[in-house]
Each structure stands twice: as C-alpha cells, then as structure tokens.
Image (cartoon, rainbow, N blue to C red):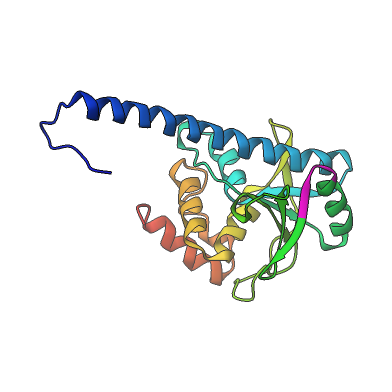
Amino acid sequence: MNLPSEHSDSPAWLAGTVAMGEEILDRMERAVVKVRERLLRATSPLNQAAILSAVVGGNAVASWVATVDEGAVRNTRDVDLLVRREDYQQVSEALSRAGFIPTDSFGVVMFHDGLAGKPSEAIHLLFAGEKTKADHLLPAPEIETFDDPANFRVLQLKPLVSLLLTRRRNEDSMLVRDVASVGLIDQTWPQKFPPELSSRLQHLLDTPDG
C-alpha cells in the first residue's frame, strides 16, 4: 500500500483509507468472535461429558488478564486444551460430535474445525504429564482449574505460567509478559519454580519490553 505524503489531503485517498479501515475492523471483530465461538463449542461437550480439561495458552492468559484489565487482553486464533491421555478417546468423540476433525501434524494432536479448517484455527491438545515436543523443558502440568465466567475451565495461574515457560516459544514469552504487565505475577514468582524455569521467568520479568 502506498502511504500519502505528510500533506496529502486527496479525497480519493481518504475515501479509500476509510473504506479499507472499516473492512479491516469488521474482519478483526469477526475473527475474535469466531475464536470465542470455537472455544465454547470445544469446551461445552467436554464439560457436559464431565471430562477433565483446561483451556491453556493464549485464551487462558486472556481470561486471567481480563480479571485485572480487559484492555490488556491479547487476541489469539488457536485454542489449546490440556487433557489427560487416558481420556483421549472420550475427548475425541466429544469434539467430533461438535464438528471437529482429528488429525496429527508433526506429533501435535489437533482437531480441525470442519473439513475446510485451518491448522492455525484448530483445537490443539496437550497431555498432562507429557512433553508435547522433545525440546520442552518439562512435561505439561497436571490439570488444576478454575471456572471462567464464560463457562469453561482455565488452568490455574501457576501451572499455566509453568507451561508457557516450558514451551520456550516467542509467543509464550509474550504471554508471560502480558500476565506480568497487569501485576498477576511479580519478582517473587521465580522462586516458585525449578531452576530451569526460574531463570527464564526472571529474564522475562527483567525485560518487560522484550
């Protein structure tokens, strides 16, 4: 896109910019709504079947951050669920009834949202007590939850932070900083974790701007 000069007041450019802006805002709003709907469609059948599970990743962080400052919430597209390996068959059946299709991508178990579903918009499963990838520092934590007001279960804050630190991805680092930015974790938290996670958390707390 060609940006205007500092003094540009072309009516054509202004009209085009306004039209494009409205379309982008509409698409952004629809994207947020779609993620929320997908999250509820996935968690509702698990709750109804009394299957122990917890929302993790970006959506869990968003729920925690929203308890302090809803304006600091970061939107995310995919839905990450922590479940128990022994419950997988029940989980698969429940998600399939809700229209999700099981698949496996490079060792990651996911459920696409219908036949045309994208991997980036899928339900991703993590298994409690297991490493999702070999280079993860520790296995995923056990399932400890609290009930989000929107009727789904979110992983408790300490195991959630532990999971984000364990995965060592840039996006997970951002999520840890999001939690810290609203005061949910502070300089007393590194001592709550084993050394391999403690030093990483300390670094993130010391570099809030990345």
Left or right of 101, for residue 27: left
Q: Which residues are magenta?
A: 97-101
42 over 33 or under it: above or below? below
**In which image quadrant can residue 25 be found?**
top left
154 over 136 or under it: above or below? above
**At x 76% / y 48%, what residue is drawn?**
100
Q: Residue furthest front?
A: 12
Figure quadrant of the C terminus: bottom left
**In which image quadrant can residue 21 be found?**
top left
Left or right of 188, for residue 117: right
Left or right of 206, for residue 77: right
84 over 145 or under it: above or below? below
Location of residue 54 in the rendering, given as x and y in whole percent from the top left corner: 73, 48
Nearer the observer, 13 or 179 = 13
Figure quadrant of the N terminus: top left
Residue 23 visible in the current orientation:
yes
